[in-house]
Image: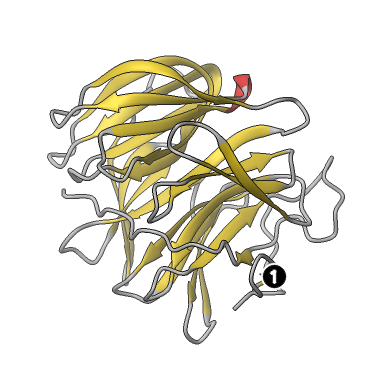
């Protein structure tokens, strides 16, 4: 485990072009993450450190576990899909933006009611979609440049969602029926901070945000006040998750390639955040 307040790089032989979409699987005792550009699905057993990988037939943005099932929901170039690993099989659910062939799904999380919230990005801009347990989707917000996130408050009644292109993290009221209200700015990044990317919430309600182009992760209090930051040796930090049986281990993904010439860019980091996290919700469908 990383020393308090520090980090370590694991595994040393993995370098992602665009690491993203990381999540914790308690039943597998493993973290899963993806390389969007290669594209690849990775897993690592957090007990043994054993690594597995599955080459994907197209761009993949995220992977989410299903409640009571052994397969996953994933965000592919073709849209929402069901992924089974053994044997490897992909079943398409549907594309929420068939009229925008250069758009793709990017970043997703599950709310306390078991619904997936996923954003899109591309030449047509981005929108925020909700995938319900019956596998039907609906557009819930639009007008983004680049959707990233989301994450949720401890009670699940607030959603935090990023427009990376505008360097803004929004807060939105999330009602039990799945509707969003009262969209407002939670925090605004400066150019020096980079752009807000992936997010997670810790057990105390702190909101952690990855800095794309800022080389760090930051924790914000529920009222939007900055709490602290942890610097990492990569410029483009993309996402994070808490993992381990005690949810006291944080893993952070990053991207490599120009203009980020730092030698550790694209690495998977284990960061000692000094706080425990929460287990991710599972998709109810």
Residue bearing mark 1? 9
Residue at the image position 66 percent from the left and 41 percent from the top: 211
Q: Position of residue 223 (x, y in %)?
A: 45, 32
Q: Position of residue 84 (x, y in %)?
A: 30, 62
Name the foreground residue: 284 vs 136: 284
Q: Position of residue 140 (x, y in %)?
A: 30, 20
Asked whether, in this view, residue 182 is left or right of residue 238, the answer is left
Tell me if residue 96 can be seen: no
**Which quadrant of the view contains residue 259?**
top right
Image colouring: secondary structure
Residue at the image position 75 percent from the left and 25 percent from the top: 191
Residue at the image position 34 percent from the left and 40 percent from the top: 153
Looking at the image, residue 7 lies above or below residue 225: below
Name the foreground residue: 72 vs 221: 221
Tell me if residue 268 can be seen: yes
Asked whether, in this view, residue 285 is left or right of residue 35, the answer is left
Q: Position of residue 143 (x, y in %)?
A: 46, 12
Q: As drawn, which residue projects farthest toward the top?
A: 143
Looking at the image, residue 138 lies above or below residue 250: above
Residue at the image position 19 percent from the left and 59 percent from the top: 67
Regarding mark 1 in the picture, which secondary structure is present there? strand
């Amino acid at each position: 485990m990383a020393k308090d307040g520090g980090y370590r790089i694991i595994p040393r032989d993995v370098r992602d072009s665009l690491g993203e979409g990381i999540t914790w699987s308690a039943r597998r005792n493993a973290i899963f993450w993806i390389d969007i550009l290669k594209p690849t699905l990775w897993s690592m057993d957090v007990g043994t450190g054993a690594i597995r990988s599955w080459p994907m037939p197209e761009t993949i943005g995220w992977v989410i576990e299903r409640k009571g099932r052994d397969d996953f929901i994933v965000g592919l170039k073709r849209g929402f899909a069901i992924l089974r690993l053994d044997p490897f099989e992909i079943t398409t659910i549907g594309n929420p933006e068939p009229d925008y062939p250069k758009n793709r799904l990017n970043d997703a999380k599950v709310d306390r009611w078991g619904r997936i919230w996923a954003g899109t990005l591309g030449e047509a801009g981005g929108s925020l979609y909700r995938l319900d347990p019956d596998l039907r989707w609906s557009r819930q917000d639009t007008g983004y440049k680049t959707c990233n996130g989301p994450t949720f408050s401890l009670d699940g009644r607030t959603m935090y969602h990023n427009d990376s292109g505008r360097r803004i993290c929004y807060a939105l009221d999330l009602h039990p029926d799945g509707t969003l209200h009262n969209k407002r700015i939670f925090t605004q990044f400066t150019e020096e901070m980079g752009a807000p990317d992936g997010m997670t919430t810790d057990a105390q309600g702190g909101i952690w945000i990855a800095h794309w182009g800022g080389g760090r992760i930051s924790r914000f209090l529920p009222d939007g006040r900055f709490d602290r930051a942890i610097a990492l040796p990569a410029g483009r930090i993309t996402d994070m998750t808490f993992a381990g049986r005690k949810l006291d281990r944080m893993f952070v993904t990053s991207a490599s390639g120009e203009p980020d010439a730092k030698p550790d860019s694209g690495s998977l980091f284990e960061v000692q955040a000094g706080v425990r996290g929460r287990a991710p919700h599972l998709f109810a469908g």
